[in-house]
């Protein structure tokens, strides 16, 4: 094993042996090169004032070489903020700005120990880093039965982990914290579990309330006290889009410093929060007991980034940074939030109006981009294809009964027609199946 990896492992084991035990085989082996092209180039950037012939970019007239046809469309930006490689950890100013934003939006992080966000190529990349560092074949990854299908690919197919599901809702249509606790405690013989908490939930658009949040934290604490090392991942892709009485903070704040056997990891990003899906700018942040531990985890994260994408795209990092620094940022975000909340409220008023009879019920939703119908007596895939073929409307079928509707991409004035047409398609399928 490389000496740098050994040194990082020794630091992690010294600072928290439980976290060291959470690392996968790859997580133990990975490191970020201290010597080589990147480190020598960084040293040259600081000292080589005359000529810098180190890194693989081209320079012309003191600026990164570029094509006018590209720069003409980006003339508001300095070429050095677009064309050079971004550091593997991301643009330093962006990392600092996102950390400040996290603290502002999550007051529970005050006086907690957590690291500087590392820039990822959006949320999926952040989750992939978690999988690489912490998931080995057979490790349990605990998620609710209403989940984003990419978890299976990221943790199951890529890393060979075992996906363990529990029902998202209990009999009272609240978050099933008892089911989560049971799934966690079932891993006692393994001594390790990876828990992914995705709120607002994809596909249902559900975020727990404060009491439910406390129950989730208590379930994770119970597992830790039972001797289980818990990698607690908050997938905060839709963070901030809280429309009704739910938690308005990430559970990352409550999980930080919860227990020595709990490693909280926050995966979030500008992707959906700032409506820049194609920019692919996300972040991964660790909470931990010491700066040494956080630094070692960051170095291993940079090793994964270096070994896969080398570094994230510089232009989109610059664009997001400029937005965060703008005095108009908060007002514009609030404007878009109001539009999204209006759409969610309109959907709920339609569904509660009684106009659709008993052809479906819906899962509780209060946040995010989506909601899910639970169809009665008809197959969801049949309804989905009927909507496409007869009405040119796209939805997502999940299992036999569930139909996911992304109200985020439908104008409020069109929602009534949308659900009326879904109702019509359900009736079509019901008649055809008789």
Image: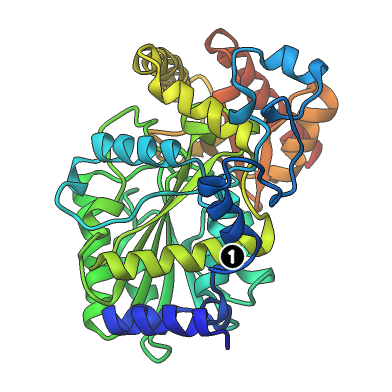
Does 257 appear above or below 322?
A: below
Q: In the picture shown, does residue 265 fall above or below 142?
A: above
Q: Dot 1: few (<14), some (14–19), or many (≥20) neighbours within 10 Å?
A: many
Compare residues 308 and 31 and report the one nearer the observer: 31
Q: Residue furthest bottom?
A: 189
Q: Position of residue 249 (x, y in %)?
A: 27, 41
- Location of mark 1 (residue): 304
Q: With 403 as the anchor, is 246 left or right in this view? A: left
Q: Name the image quarter holding residue 307.
A: bottom right
Task: State the image quarter where residue 156 is shown.
Answer: bottom right
Locate the N terminus by quadrant. bottom right
What secondary structure is marked by label 1? helix
Q: Quadrant of residue 182?
A: bottom left
* Residue in the picture at 69% in, 52% down: 54
Find the residue positioned furthest to the right.
389
Residue that extends furthest to the front in the rendered view of this protein: 50
- Measured from the top left, where is residue 334 in percent x and y? 36, 16
Position of 72 relative to 434 (above/below): above
Q: Quarter holding the C terminus?
A: top right
């Amino acid at each position: 094993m490389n000496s740098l990896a050994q040194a990082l492992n020794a630091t992690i084991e010294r600072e928290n042996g439980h976290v060291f035990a959470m690392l996968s085989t790859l997580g133990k082996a990975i490191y970020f090169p201290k010597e080589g092209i990147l480190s020598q180039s960084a040293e040259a950037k600081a000292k080589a004032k005359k000529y810098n012939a180190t890194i693989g970019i081209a320079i012309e007239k003191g600026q990164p070489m570029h094509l006018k046809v590209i720069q003409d469309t980006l003339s508001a930006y300095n070429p050095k903020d677009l064309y050079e490689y971004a550091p593997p950890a991301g643009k330093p100013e962006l990392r600092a700005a996102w950390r400040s934003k996290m603290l502002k939006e999550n007051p529970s992080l005050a006086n907690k120990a957590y690291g500087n966000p590392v820039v990822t190529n959006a949320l999926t990349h952040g989750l992939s880093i978690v999988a690489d560092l912490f998931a080995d074949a057979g490790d349990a990854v605990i998620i609710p039965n209403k989940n984003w299908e990419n978890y299976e690919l990221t943790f199951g197919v890529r890393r060979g982990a075992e996906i363990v599901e529990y029902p998202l809702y209990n009999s009272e249509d609240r978050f099933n914290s008892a089911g989560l606790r049971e799934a966690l405690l079932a891993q006692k013989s393994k001594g390790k579990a990876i828990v992914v908490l995705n709120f607002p939930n994809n596909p249902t658009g559900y975020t727990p309330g404060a009491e439910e949040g406390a129950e989730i934290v208590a379930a994770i604490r119970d597992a830790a006290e039972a001797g289980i090392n818990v990698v607690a991942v908050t997938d905060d892709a839709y963070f901030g889009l809280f429309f009704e009485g739910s938690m308005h903070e990430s559970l990352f704040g409550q999980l930080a410093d919860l227990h020595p056997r709990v490693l909280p990891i926050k995966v979030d990003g500008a992707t959906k929060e700032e409506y820049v899906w194609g920019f692919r700018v996300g972040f991964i942040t660790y909470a931990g007991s010491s700066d040494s531990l956080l630094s070692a985890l960051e170095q291993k994260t940079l090793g994964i980034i270096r070994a896969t994408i080398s570094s994230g795209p510089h232009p989109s990092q610059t664009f997001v940074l400029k937005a965060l620094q703008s005095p108009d940022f908060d007002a514009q975000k609030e404007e878009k939030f109001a539009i999204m909340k209006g759409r969610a409220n309109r959907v709920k008023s339609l569904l509660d109006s009684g106009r659709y009879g008993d052809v479906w019920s819906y899962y509780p939703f209060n946040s995010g981009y989506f909601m899910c119908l639970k169809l009665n007596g008809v197959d969801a895939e049949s309804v989905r294809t009927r909507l496409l073929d007869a009405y040119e409307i796209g939805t997502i079928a999940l299992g036999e009964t569930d139909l996911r509707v992304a109200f985020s991409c439908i104008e409020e004035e069109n929602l009534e027609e949308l659900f009326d047409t879904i109702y019509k398609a359900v009736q079509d399928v019901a008649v055809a199946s008789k």
